[in-house]
Image: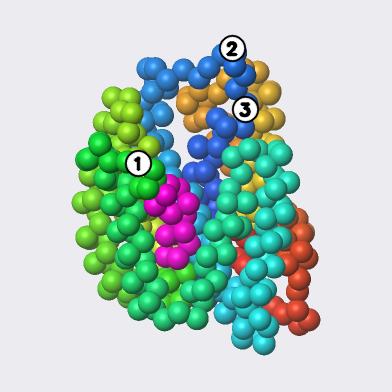
Amino acid sequence: MQSSVTPKERIQALDIIRGFALFGILFINIAGYQVLVEGGPMPDFTGINQTIDSLINVFVEKKFYSIFSFLFGVGFYIFASRAEARGDKPRWRFVRRLLALLLIGIVHIFIFWGSILVFYAVIGLLLLPFYKAGLNTIRSWLIGLITLQIVATALPLFVPTTDSAVPSIFSNDSMIVFIMFLSGFYVSKAGWIQNVKEVKQLKLLFIGLLPFAVGSMLWIWFASEGNNGNLMQIMALGTVPITYCYLILLFWIFSNPTAVRLCQPIAKVGRMALTNYIAQSFIALAIISVMGLEVVNSKDIMIIAPMVFAIQIGFSVVYFKFFKMGPMEKLWRWMTGKSTGARHSNNLDTI
């Protein structure tokens, strides 16, 4: 019996995880698609809505953006290394890629103010110096950045008199995104994705981080239910260990060929992640309009998010019966520029 995935299935596994990340992101973004007007109705955060909101804070908030960010780092290494293999200039090609993403992101901001595309394009530039760096150097940077992020986030929580201006520079979402970018780059460069089950470091990391991840989830739950004013910092403190545990579990699951085959429809969503990410805002707004909602509460999100994702699965499956690349991915590739005779894997034109 086949016990490991083929190279093609590895690419599909990345697309599946990217698809799941898009689903998780929906639970965060949907409420932001509808602009609240001062003096108008406001979301209800009591009763069942509060419970659902707390669950989203525990299991979803910041974690799925972080998974998405990790996969961006993986994509950077694959994109750049293959560009170099065909005699191209990998860093220059990636800069063009980021500039194209920046332009797309600027346009998207006019559609959805919370778009991450500009954010990704700017922070992605910080990966460039690490392309030629050795694994030991990258690992040292990762350990240093994670330590800095944890200390900067925890300090105001445990020492309330601390001036928050300096720690906030290292504890904000930008730091988490870059940590996950660099983590994805490191894992891809180290070749861990190719042999997930055989990498002892991942097993040790999971065992070591699991108690912290579970403890962080419990802390987030009680902070959310108690309307703790430091909730965002508490969530930020647990984001990296929880996301690492999520990722290791997902890669273990999708190192099984059967799991990969069963989730092929979700892989189609992840295969054109840029198109689907942008399309989510249009689909969600249309559903909100049809439902006649003046304001989106947490219980509404639990209905709308699966509906949006189901529509995207159906569309993506049908779309790839006729086309090989998503429309926004095709635009992004054209804006990036394509060398003659270059061959790209499906997952390289996704965010």
**Residue 186 in view (yes/no):** yes
Q: Residue at x 43, y 71 (%)?
A: 186
Q: CA distance from mark 2 to mark 3?
A: 15 Å
Secondary structure of residue under mark 1: loop
Residue 77's spot in the image, x, y percent?
53, 73
Q: Is residue 150 left or right of residue 52?
A: left
Q: Which residue is mark 1?
A: 164
Main secondary structure along the magenta-highlighted residues: helix
Which residues are drawn in magenta? Answer: 169-183
Tell me which amino acid carries mark 3: Gln
Nearest the eye: 278 or 92: 92
Q: Which tag is nearer the camera, tag 2 or tag 3?
A: 2
Quarter that holds the N terminus = bottom left
Q: Which tag is nearer the camera, tag 2 or tag 1?
A: 1
Q: Which residue is mark 3?
A: 34
Q: Which residue is mark 2?
A: 39
Q: Is residue 316 above or below residue 302?
A: below
